[in-house]
Image: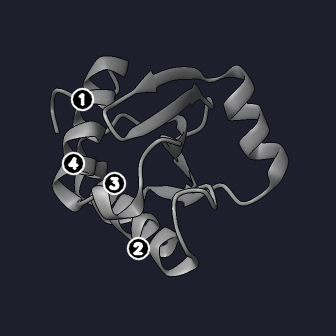
Amino acid sequence: MKTTKMLKKNYEFKQVLSKGNYYAGENIIAFILKNNQEINFLGLAVSTKIGKAYQRNRIKRLLRENYKNIEKSLKKGYSIVFLIKKNKKATEINFKKIEKDMIHIFNHAKIIDSDG
């Protein structure tokens, strides 16, 4: 994630969640906010209702890896927060489903760069 930094502070998440645009896939939800910088910011939040700690960590690893694969083709200057839908269980979520949802969300949000 060379061109992306992670959101870590609570106020950073709140800003994106309150002012960002909402996009939903089958398994994940994304809030995307333009940040007027030359870098993207990524935030991941997985509720405890999804599963045990090792399951939530696995989902976060899958989200990061999928983002890393798509990152090269994204436009710069956005803050993105991913959430997992509350009615999903950790056992239902896999790499391909997240990849499909991310591509759908980024296409819908029009932040995939046509050059990439």
**Could you say where residue 46 lies in the image, as x and y percent from the top left?**
57, 56
Query: In front: mark 3 or mark 2?
Result: 2
Residue 1 appears in the picture as rendered: no
Residue corresponding to mark 2: 58
Mark 3 and mark 2 lie on one chain; the one further toward the N terminus is 2
Query: Marks 1 and 4: CB-CB under 8 Å?
Result: no
Badge 3 density bin: few <14, some 14–19, many ≥20, Cα 10 Å? some
- For label 3, the SS is helix
Q: Is residue 16 left or right of residue 68?
A: right
Question: 82 or 75, which is in the foreground?
Answer: 82
Q: Is residue 103 left or right of residue 24?
A: left
User: Looking at the picture, does residue 75 appear above or below residue 5?
Assistant: above
Q: Which mark is residue 97?
A: 4
Question: 113 or 81, which is in the foreground?
Answer: 81
- For label 1, the SS is helix
**Could you say where residue 50 lies in the image, as x and y percent from the top left?**
52, 58
Residue corresponding to mark 1: 104
Query: In front: mark 3 or mark 4?
Result: 4
Q: Amino acid at mark 3?
A: Tyr
- Residue 13 lies in quadrant: top right
**Could you say where residue 62 lies in the image, as x and y percent from the top left?**
34, 65
Mark 1 and mark 4 lie on one chain; the one further toward the N terminus is 4
Q: CA distance from mark 3 to mark 2?
A: 14 Å
Mark 1 and mark 3 lie on one chain; the one further toward the N terminus is 3
Badge 4 density bin: few <14, some 14–19, many ≥20, Cα 10 Å? some
Q: Which mark is residue 67?
A: 3
Question: 30 or 94, which is in the foreground?
Answer: 94
- For label 2, the SS is helix
Mark 1 and mark 2 lie on one chain; the one further toward the N terminus is 2
Question: 70 or 96, which is in the foreground?
Answer: 96
